[in-house]
């Protein structure tokens, strides 16, 4: 989908599909030894985990990672509420 829009953002769904296709073609030899459903299920699980990690690392490299929560500001708000009730 990002190719159609023209953005460079990598979506998890697209990445998962690409990883699944590459893994299934690379591990096609094992489909004869194991059941097809079992191989497909395990490849789907693994590709989901791998795609999530790929997208996270791509976001970190591009500098668009989500900002961490400001725990200091939250703790100050809690302290103010406690002082107001006392």
Image: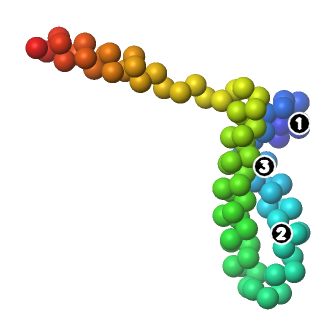
Graded by Cα atoms within 10 Å as few (under 14), some (14 to 19) or many (20 or more), the crowding at tag 2 reads some
Instruction: Please give the label number shown on residue 49.
Output: none
Residue 27: % across, % down? 84, 73
Q: Given this view, does label 1 or label 2 mark the residue nearer the observer?
A: 2
Q: CA distance from mark 1 to mark 3?
A: 15 Å
Q: Residues within 10 Å of mark 1 (few under 14, many from 20)?
A: few
Q: Is residue 13 visible?
A: no
Indicate the secondary structure of the residue bearing disc 2: helix
In the rendered image, the residue lying farthest to the bottom is 33
In-image side of 84 versus 18 (left or right): left
Image location (x, y in percent) of residue 68: 53, 27
| Mark 1 or mark 3, earlier in chain | 1
Instruction: Tell me the element at label 3.
Output: helix
Task: Relative to 73, say whether 57 is above or below.
Answer: below
Is 27 on the left or on the right of 35, as rendered?
right
The residue drawn where x is 69% and y is 63% is 46
**SS class, disc 1:** helix
Name the residue located 32 percent from the left edge and 15 percent from the top edge.
Answer: 76
Q: Mark 2 — residue?
A: 24
Q: Position of residue 12 (x, y in %)?
A: 72, 46
**Quadrant of res 23:** bottom right
> Considering only order in the chain, which callout, 3 or 2, is on the residue closer to the N terminus?
3
**CA distance separating discs 2 and 3:** 14 Å
Residue that numbered label 3 is attached to:
15
**Callouts 1 and 3 close, C-beta under 8 Å:** no
- In depth, the one of 26 and 61 nearer the eye is 61
Q: Which mark is residue 4?
A: 1
Q: Looking at the image, how many numbered discs can be counted on the residues? A: 3
């Amino acid at each position: 989908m990002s190719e159609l829009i023209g953005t460079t953002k990598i979506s998890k769904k697209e990445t998962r599909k690409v990883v699944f296709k590459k893994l299934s073609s690379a591990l096609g030899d094992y489909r004869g030894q194991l059941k097809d459903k079992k191989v497909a299920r395990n490849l789907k699980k693994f590709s989901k985990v791998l795609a999530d990690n790929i997208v996270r690392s791509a976001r970190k490299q591009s500098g668009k990672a989500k900002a961490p929560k400001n725990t200091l500001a939250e703790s100050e708000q809690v302290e103010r509420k406690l002082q107001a009730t006392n």
